[in-house]
Image: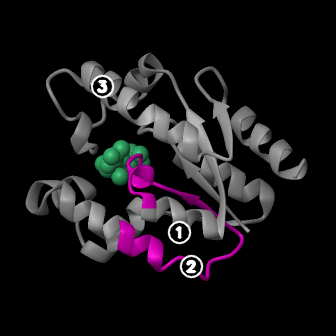
Amino acid sequence: MNIILIGFMGSGKSSVGHLLADKMGMRYLDCDELISNTEKMPISAIFAKKGEEYFRKVETEVIKTLQDYDNFVVSTGGGMVLREENVKMLKEIGRLVLLWAEPKVIFDRIHNQSHRPLLNVPDPMAAIEKILNERRPIYDTVADFKVDASNLKIEETAEKIIQWIKSK
Ligand code: S3P
């Protein structure tokens, strides 16, 4: 069984994912890192040179390669669950855990970073609110478990996920 972390940019998937993997004795895999390595360029360059649609295709290709993975904590890009076929494949290999964070929290975390093309815009707060609003119903529907990580420390978020896994 794998634990698949889903959720918006800046919701803490990477930091929680690393800690969770450590605590559970699982391995950690970051889909964006895999994509960057395969494409030999950062995500922002893929968006700039090849476009978002191309990136989305590569995301799906990457998920296809994970079908034999076991005992991994997998961190996905914030848009990974937008495609139904991705969700279907992810559900076949693990449980989907949503890390939720309020827009203001996300803004505070990401506003001085520049590696996220969708938020590298003149008004990132407006972009966060807009995209989050569009995606919220999808995140809510596909998640097997949700943690509102807005006011939690990384440790606390990881602990909530561990308690949920143990209760299964
Ligand atoms: C995206 C999220 C990013 C990355 C890409 C697109 C999105 O990953 O996959 O920039 O559509 O939400 P993080 O959620 O890890 O920042």
Question: In the structure shown, which secondary structural element does the residue marked by tag 2 occupy?
Answer: loop
Disc 1 residue type?
A: Met
Q: Quick check: is 67 in the magenta stretch?
A: yes
Q: Which mark is residue 67?
A: 2
Residue farthest left in this picture: 49
Question: In the structure shown, which secondary structural element does the residue marked by tag 3 occupy?
Answer: helix
Binning the other alpha carbons within 10 Å of mark 3 as few (below 14), some (14 to 19) or many (20 upward) gives few
Residue located beneath label 1 in the image: 89
Q: Where does the N terminus fall, quadrant-wise?
A: bottom right
Structural distance between the alpha carbons of marks 2 and 1:
8 Å
161, above or below 100, in the image: below
Q: Which mark is residue 130?
A: 3
Q: Which mark is residue 106?
A: none
Please tell me which of labels 3 and 1 falls first in the chain.
1
Disc 3 residue type?
A: Lys
Please tell me which of labels 3 and 2 falls first in the chain.
2
Q: What's drawn in magenta, residue-wise?
A: 60-84
Residue farthest right in this picture: 167
x and y percent of residue 61 in the render? Answer: 37, 75
x and y percent of residue 47 in the render? Answer: 17, 55
Name which residue lies at 20% across and 59% down. 53
x and y percent of residue 20 in the render? Answer: 70, 51
Question: In the structure shown, which secondary structural element does the residue marked by tag 1 occupy?
Answer: helix
x and y percent of residue 161 in the render? Answer: 75, 44
133, above or below 43, in the image: above
Name which residue lies at 43% across and 26% down. 106
Name which residue lies at 72% across and 42% down. 158
